[in-house]
Amino acid sequence: MPASLFIRRPWLWPVAWSSAVLALVGAAWLAIRSRELPEPQRPEMPLEAVARVGSTFVTAAQLRDGMQRAPASEAGRAAALEEQIRQSLLLAEAERSGFTRQPELEEAWRSLVVRRFREQLESQLQSEAVVSDAEVDAYYASHSERFMSPEQRRLALIFIPLPPGAGESRVRALEQECRIIHQRAVAEAGDPGSFATLARQHSGHPASRHAGGEVGWLLSAQARRAWPAAVVEAAFALGRDGDLTAPIATAEGWYILKRLGLRPEQPLPLHDVRERIRGQLAKARMQDLEDRQFAELRARHGVEVDAGRVAAVEVPAVKPALVRSLAQQPPASPVP
């Protein structure tokens, strides 16, 4: 457009000025679009990192842990790094997609944190729950009746077995044989070797026959696992060494027992129970420390329970598999 036109027509000056400004802005915009924009500044990798995955890092410790499960070679190092990168990628995508916000995963994370933190607290309390030798000695002195060795009896036996399906006449014959053996044992009670000789000749108990019928030192509980209750009661009722039971009839045959020795109930030596006492005292102390710790946490954080809402929560039925699992667990040993 000729300049003389602007001179003759001043009302065109603002229009020309606006057109020039727009042209400059457009040129600048085209210049910016014609080249790539610089990437935003990303934080530098920390010294302990070996790789970046999105906004997170793969650390040297993570790589070392992965290399323990890989071949000891450069290829193993590369494979371990790739596995750590893939794990980080999966975690990043799980968080981006909302997968990590599923209730069951949040509960699993809560349980993990609670378990690990509890382990840390218990580790701290263990140093406070140490029990000294002096405390063990004092507890043993005041509670020695709790640490008793049960009575033991040294016994010998003669067993006359009853064959399966034996007729009445056979049963009577075996019973008579047992009575004759018993009469001989009583008559020869003054001879220490008589019972052993009779056992070798007549007993049908393979485990003791060649030892002269001797079965060693037994607790009542041990005997009850091996013999019928009537046999155990008769054996542990013998009053003196050398005493014999009468023939005891059972569904499997006849027993004659002899008492050879007695170890009465007595306190266990301290050195035999020292560590058991230490463990019991440490456990009780840990429980007390834990109770006090949770009392402090309750006071610090506050706990409010709505009893009505608690009562409204239905108790789930016990699954059959859990019932079987509980039934198969051995009973806990009694603690003195």
Image (cartoon, grey):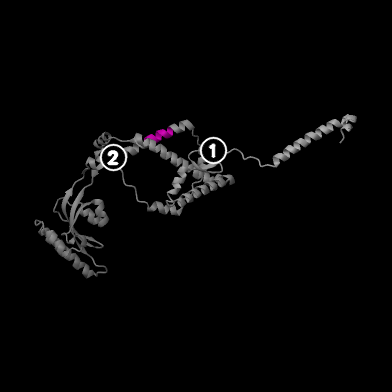
What label does residue 44 carry, if any? 1
At a point 43% along the width and 33% down the height, the residue shown is 295
Question: Which residue is disc 2 drawn over?
Answer: 277
**Three-letter amino acid code at the position of disc 1:** Glu
Q: Which residues are magenta?
A: 288-295
Q: Nearer the viewer, residue 190 or 73?
A: 73
For this view, does 326 lie left or right of residue 86?
left
For this view, does 176 lie left or right of residue 165?
left
- Which quarter of the figure has residue 162? bottom left
Is 10 above or below relative to 272? above
The percent position of residue 335, horizontal first and vertical second, equals 31, 43
The percent position of residue 93, horizontal first and vertical second, equals 57, 47
The percent position of residue 329, horizontal first and vertical second, equals 37, 51
Quick one: quadrant of the N terminus? Answer: top right
At a point 71% along the width and 39% down the height, the residue shown is 31
At a point 73% along the width and 38% down the height, the residue shown is 29
Is residue 205 visible to us here? no
